[in-house]
Image: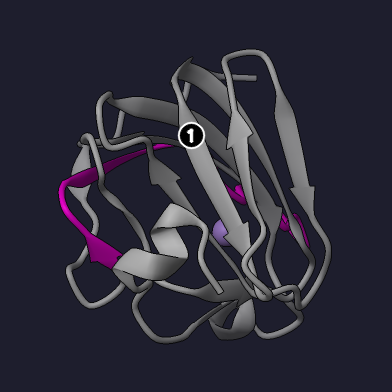
Amino acid sequence: MHILPATPTTKNPPTQFRGDVWLDVIASPQDGDQRMTVGRVRFAPGAGTAWHSHARGQFLHVTQGVGRFGVRGGTVIELHPGQTLYTPPGQEHWHAANEDCFMEHLAMLEAGDDPATSTTWLEHVTEEEYRGGA
Ligand code: MN
């Protein structure tokens, strides 16, 4: 066993995120057919992802602040520190911080059979969708 080298914090790209969203990779595949990736993601107030889905689903565990998580149809779930949300394979969703505070979560997912398909990115989230409209 060994301590993994620290990786620099990176800013997530504006094509897939709105506002300032920063990523620290905590764990990623090291050997053989490992698939697990764990990231710490920090969202500025009101910042969030575009719509997307994950080939093998995703677990999201909020560690700070208040998060907003949306699925198709207008449902928005508010998540607080200590709570874990699960999104099944292929479910289209988004993650964001509440507009009045930062939000940090751990994002855990497994790579798809083709790692390029682990996350499928879609269109940006509208203001109405962010607020919980249809
Ligand atoms: Mn996701």
Q: Position of residue 11 (x, y in %)?
A: 18, 50
Q: Quadrant of residue 78?
A: top right
Q: Position of residue 55 (x, y in %)?
A: 73, 76
Q: Which residues are magenta?
A: 17-36
The image quadrant where one finds ligand 1 is bottom right
Can see residue 62? yes
Mark 1: give few (<14), some (14-19) or many (20+) Cα within 10 Å. many
Q: Amino acid at mark 1?
A: Gly
- Disc tally is 1
- Read off the residue under disc 1: 67
Q: Residue at x 21, y 35 (%)?
A: 44
The image's colouring method is one colour
Q: Does residue 80 appear to the left or right of 114 in the view shown? A: left
Q: Is residue 3 above or below residue 78?
A: above
Q: Residue at x 51, y 66 (%)?
A: 133
Of residues 113 and 51, the one nearer the viewer is: 51
